Amino acid sequence: MNDRLTSVIRGTGSALPERIMRNQDFEGIVDTSDEWIRQRTGIAARHIAGEGETTVSLAEAAARRALDAAGMAADDIDLIILATATPNNTFPASAVQVQAALGITHGFAFDVHAVCSGFVYALTTADLYLRGGQARTALVIGAETFSRLLDWEDRTTCVLFGDGAGAVVLQAETAEGPEPHGVLVSRLRSDGCHQEKLYVDGGPSTTGTVGHLRMQGREVFKHAVGMITDVIEDSFAAAGIGPDDIDWFVPHQANRRIIEASAKKLGIAQEKVIITVEGHGNTSAASIPLALDAAVRDGRIRPGHLVLLEAMGGGFTWGAVLIRW
Ligand code: UT7
């Protein structure tokens, strides 16, 4: 590992399916209400992939926008890491399908599977490859089509999730000056003892089917805030900073109540929290890069800002990344 190298974000991009499904649209499908969904989750609407829209097509669109924002060409990319639990095919990896769609024939590409924590895992992995000198410029993508895993008769899950993709261009540069930019600290965790609380009841090696998402929502909720705050406190300690040093907190967007409770427990002011769950629902690995792109494009996240990412999801997996923009 080269201690002088740091991984810097050069550009962000995102893509959402055309079709928007509002809470009211569920009222004829399952026994639910706009009021229940808003109160319990903060979600008002989500995007649902239509025919021809897939994890790979959304990922490609997000990647092209991130490349545009970075002022780079696809040819500059020598590593693609795509976080997804909903790949187009069981294999090959969706990352190599994006690589082909972008016309890249050099470097290497692979998927990372850590469900809702996927983007935090993928960013951490890319940072290690870049600082290890195995690649110079990476596309790190979170892309999902969870709508295709949902049991549309189960009101406890079908109202919660949405589809989309977000991407960042991450590039190795030589660290300079007293205040280094780029990925400063990351901390990843998992504990497979909790797998039955959030899982898909199918797969190639068991049922030979895709399966449906199953979740004990209350159980997940019970663990979420503690796990999130533990891993963030570890990151703060490793970076020698505290909650007041953070400019923006960009959490995984599963539930507004979880996000606000975590920020409160950590002492992070609510006005520093980026929230997109209202319009996106829970887009699993795509939620953080979608939120990042929104906050970069509307001018909230700016160069020099200290940005904290956090995610928790199926596995359980969880993690945090601190970035100086
Ligand atoms: O991204 C990965 C991580 N995932 C999460 O972080 C999700 C974590 N969990 C949650 O966000 C929340 O637990 C939920 C939003 C899933 C549920 O909220 P809750 O406040 O924990 O509700 P609950 O599961 O305790 O259910 C309360 C009631 C139940 O009825 P009874 O048993 O009290 O009669 C449910 O059957 O709400 C009922 N319910 C619904 N009612 C209307 C559950 N889903 C719905 C619904 N519409 N869609």
Image: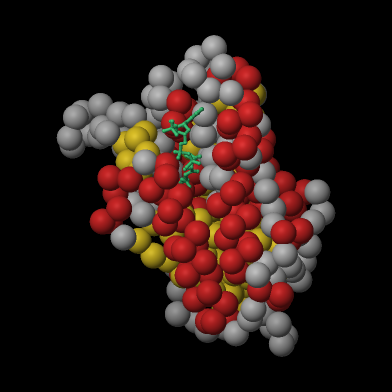
Q: Quadrant of the C terminus?
A: bottom right
Residue 245 horizontal/vertical position (percent): 71, 76
* Quadrant housing residue 171: bottom right
Is 84 on the left or on the right of 195, as rendered? right
Going 58% across and 31% down the picture, which residue do you hit? 36
Residue 128 horizontal/vertical position (percent): 46, 69
Relative to 123, is 214 above or below?
above
Is 92 on the left or on the right of 20, as rendered? left
Is 308 on the left or on the right of 205, as rendered? right
* Quadrant housing residue 190: bottom left
Is 323 on the left or on the right of 145, as rendered? right
Going 36% across and 54% down the picture, which residue do you hit? 316
Going 59% across and 66% down the picture, which residue do you hit? 265
Taking the view exactly as shown, the residue that stands out farthest to the top is: 28
Residue 13 horizontal/vertical position (percent): 66, 45
Image colouring:
secondary structure
Taking the view exactly as shown, the residue that stands out farthest to the left is: 206
Relative to 48, is 42 above or below?
below
Residue 184 horizontal/vertical position (percent): 58, 75
* Quadrant housing residue 155: top left
How many circles with numbers are drawn on the protein? 0
Relative to 237, is 317 above or below?
above
Q: In which quarter of the image is the N terminus?
A: bottom left
Is any part of residue 148 visible from this angle?
A: no
Going 58% across and 23% down the picture, which residue do you hit? 33
In this view, the residue in front, 12 or 114, is 114
Relative to 311, is 186 above or below?
below
Is any part of residue 297 visible from this angle?
A: yes
